[in-house]
Amino acid sequence: MEQYAIKGGNPLVGEVEIGGAKNAALAILAASVMTDETVVIENMPDVRDTNVLLQAIESIGGIVERIDRHTVRINGSQIHNLVIDGDYIKKIRASYYLLGALLGKYKKAEVALPGGCNIGSRPIDQHIKGFRALGANVNIAHGLIHAEAERLLGSHIYMDVVTVGATINVMMAAVMAEGQTIIENAAKEPHVVDLANFLNSMGANIKGAGTDVIRIRGVARLHKTEYTIIPDQIEAGTFMFAAAVTKGDITVKNVIPKHLESISAKLLEIGCEVEESDDAVRVVASKRLSHTHVKTLPYPGFPTDMQPQIAVALGLSNGTSIVTESIFENRFKYVDELTRMGASIKVESNTAIIDGVDRYTGASITAPDLRAGAALVLAGLAAEGFTTIDEIRYIERGYEDFPQKLQSLGAQIELVDTDKELQKFKLRVG
Ligand code: UD1
């Protein structure tokens, strides 16, 4: 079984290139079939989630051509099937973006109810409410969500919670609706803005993305475009915390520092040095980390997708920290694994109380989900001795070449498939 084998203890030092944002890519790939003309997308991360979505686009008749590893050409003119089903599709949550995209273009779609990371119950009531407000009939039967409309009419939609997924899905469904749609209490995440910029480059008329209120004037059709996806805020943040936990010195390159402000602020608070330039951020950790408190919030607050990574750092800090998870209710599943590495953490409902320890010790652990999996890799890199991490398929959903990028910073980490390979790794790194 594939695992990461890690020998911890090396400070990570050097520069690392950050790839395109997975969560922006998923929205943009779905939206790319909304025109019959050809769309070229650059800076596409080559990760499992985006590849599964490309497979889904091909399965309904979309034409997908890889120009190179990070550039893809998509043409949606031959789409003949509006049903997206199959076991593979349930594995990625963002498959439901095809619902908004196909409903917007063809006024009809049927998509398997999504799965994705098991980080709590993930309702889709706001997506459904938005589609219905635009005039669609929506029902769920036999594990599929079916949405259909004779006409889509612009509407005024107030989101009851700040949701990235529903903001994106409703935005796509509304782009070619008749008249004006206003989404209030919209999510402001960088990938919401990136999708709006992408759709506007195809001729859509979307204003206000990045604020609480998004205004969309329906247009009759969308046209071809060439577009470059923004850098991945969470991949960048993960490497920034890799510097913090290994007492390293890492420069993350090809990033938008503004998107990383909440992460940089916390790193400064816990005693790291953070230097920003136009498209890079350097994090240096030279002393024992200090404790702090953090609460996850929608953007521009501290991202829930960085919660496990900061918890791993606070577990090594000097004092007691409190981490409050306010977005997903089941996002502390990594705590038991981290405890096996020597962490001292107590979870009470949506709060983790962390008493910092001097060091972690290597152990055999399992990745419970994507971001927690990456955070446990950081713990392994900081720990004394060997760590093995199972279920790395979660990590591969969202991190491209994760072990290779870490190796280039001096980490002793390897993907191993057999016990023999693991023994070889242990012998080699001593
Ligand atoms: C997206 C990201 C995920 C990130 C999350 C929060 C993608 C593919 N995934 O997930 O990495 O952790 O944003 O930044 O972009 N909610 C409802 N009803 C709904 C929809 C959501 O109550 O119809 C609730 C959720 O249960 C959660 C909160 O709203 O408590 C935020 O969820 P949402 O922003 O929609 O997350 P996702 O889009 O699923």
Image (spheres, rainbow, N blue to C red):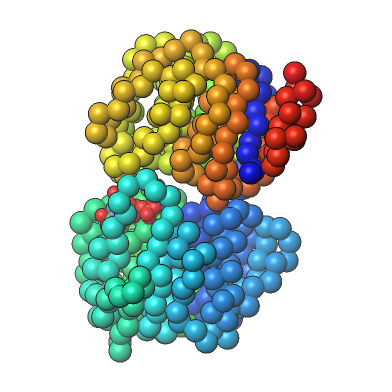
Viewer can see residue 430: yes
Left or right: where 184 falls relative to 3: left
Q: Indicate whether 24 appears above or below 285.
A: below
Q: Residue at x 52, y 17 (%)?
A: 360
Q: Position of residue 52 (x, y in %)?
A: 56, 63
Q: Residue at x 39, y 18 (%)?
A: 344
- The image quadrant of residue 185 is bottom left
Q: As rendered, which of 319 and 268 lies closer to the eye?
A: 319
Q: As rendered, which of 26 and 36 lies closer to the eye?
A: 26
Q: Residue at x 41, y 66 (%)?
A: 96
Q: Position of residue 386 (x, y in %)?
A: 63, 23
- The image quadrant of residue 55 is bottom right
Left or right: where 49 falls relative to 64: left
Taking the view exactly as shown, the residue that stands out farthest to the bottom is 150
Q: Residue at x 46, y 37 (%)?
A: 372
Q: Indicate whether 68 appears above or below 374.
A: below
Q: Indicate whether 48 appears above or below 198.
A: above
> Quadrant where the N terminus lies?
top right
> Quadrant where the C terminus lies?
top right
Q: Position of residue 308 (x, y in %)?
A: 43, 33
